[in-house]
Image (cartoon, rainbow, N blue to C red):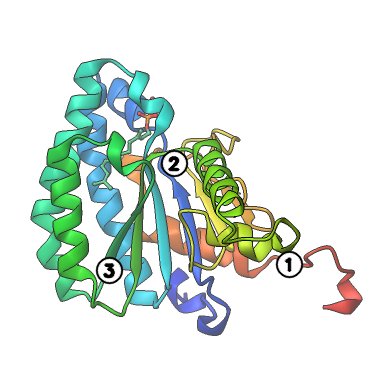
Amino acid sequence: MESLKDQLIREKLPKHVAVIMDGNGRWAQKKGNSRIFGHQHGVTAVREVTEAAAELGIGYLTLYAFSTENWSRPKREVDALMSLLVSTISSETKTLIKNNVRLNTIGCRECLPASVLKKLEDAEAKTSENTGLTLVLALSYSSRWEIVDASKRIARDVQNGKLNVDDIDDNIFSEYLATKGMPDPELMIRTSGELRISNFLLWQLAYTELYFTEVLWPDYRKEDFYEALLDYQRRERRFGKTSQQI
Ligand code: FPP
């Protein structure tokens, strides 16, 4: 039997896949452990999916690692997530370089603790020349934050005479978003059985195919990722047109 990976049509792979990594807490609780234990094991899944995407030649992988709303979790969990980010980025930078992966982030940079920001900036600088997969971590990110932030900067540029109100269109607006220069995701995966977007890439997901799986994030492996890509390849993307027009 042909493996899932071999069944993929290489020319029909998405250029950009976005993932809501959900279910770390439930995974840990099922095992009688703390939520933090779940996040620690979530790192294995991050590694797997990043490696799979890089091997397949996918251009962009955006992972929702920490939302604006996540700041209101118990301090202990927030602190643990921040130190997990710092330690993972430190230990993985070498592997990112070896695999030609470029690290980027989207979200409120100034909302992050200085230690996290420093590590991120360091890893971004060290991987900036890489030409393979771009791994985008959404950190202190929420889509409404991003859209409000873009609107403020657009208003300022109009005020300063740098931008004409009548020139504002989809393309100009996209230029003010954190994802500037990136293609919109063709596929968005959410794990853990929740059927929500949760304030993630609301503008960019306009025509994205959505894929939901019951698998909890710490259990997510390359085969699960291939399964989502195969499902995506079986769909017909019409962008508002009829089947006959495609
Ligand atoms: C959602 O599960 C997961 C998060 C809020 C954090 C995601 C972080 C990681 C996978 C680890 C670090 C990431 C990187 C990029 C190094 P949840 O806690 O909401 O789970 P629950 O819904 O079961 O409670």
Q: Is residue 71 left or right of residue 60?
A: left
**Depth check, front residue: 152 or 29:** 152
Query: Does 110 sit above or below residue 91?
Result: above
Which residue lies most toward the bottom here? 11
3D distance between C-alphas at marks 1 and 2: 25 Å
Instruction: Indicate yes or no: mark 2 CB to ligand 1 under 8 Å.
Output: no
The amino acid at mark 2 is Val
Q: Which residue is mark 1?
A: 237
Residue type of the residue flagged with mark 3 = Arg
Picture residue at 41% right of the left edge, 31% below the top: 68
Residue tagged 2: 215
Report the side of 195 relative to 28 (left or right): right
Tell me if residue 33 can be seen: no
Residue 215 shows in the view: yes
Q: Residue at 60% of width from left, 35% of height from top?
A: 195
Which of the marked residues, 1 or 2, is nearer the chain's N terminus? 2
Distance (Cα) linking label 2 and label 3: 27 Å
- Crowd around label 2: few <14 · some 14–19 · many ≥20 (10 Å): some
Where disc 3 sits, the SS reads: strand
Report the number of numbered marks: 3
Tell us which disc is closer to us: 1 or 2. Answer: 1
- Tag 3 residue: 102
Kindly identify the amino acid type of the residue bearing the numbered disc 1. Arg
Q: Which one is nearer the viewer's eye here, 243 or 176?
A: 176
- Examine the image and state in which quarter residue 135 appears: bottom left
Going by the image, does 128 lie left or right of 137?
left
The crowd level at tag 3 (other Cα within 10 Å; few <14, some 14-19, many 20+) is many
Q: Disc 1, ligand 1: is the CB inside 8 Å?
A: no
Q: On the picture, is 9 further left or further right than 50?
A: right
Percent x, y for residue 13?
53, 74
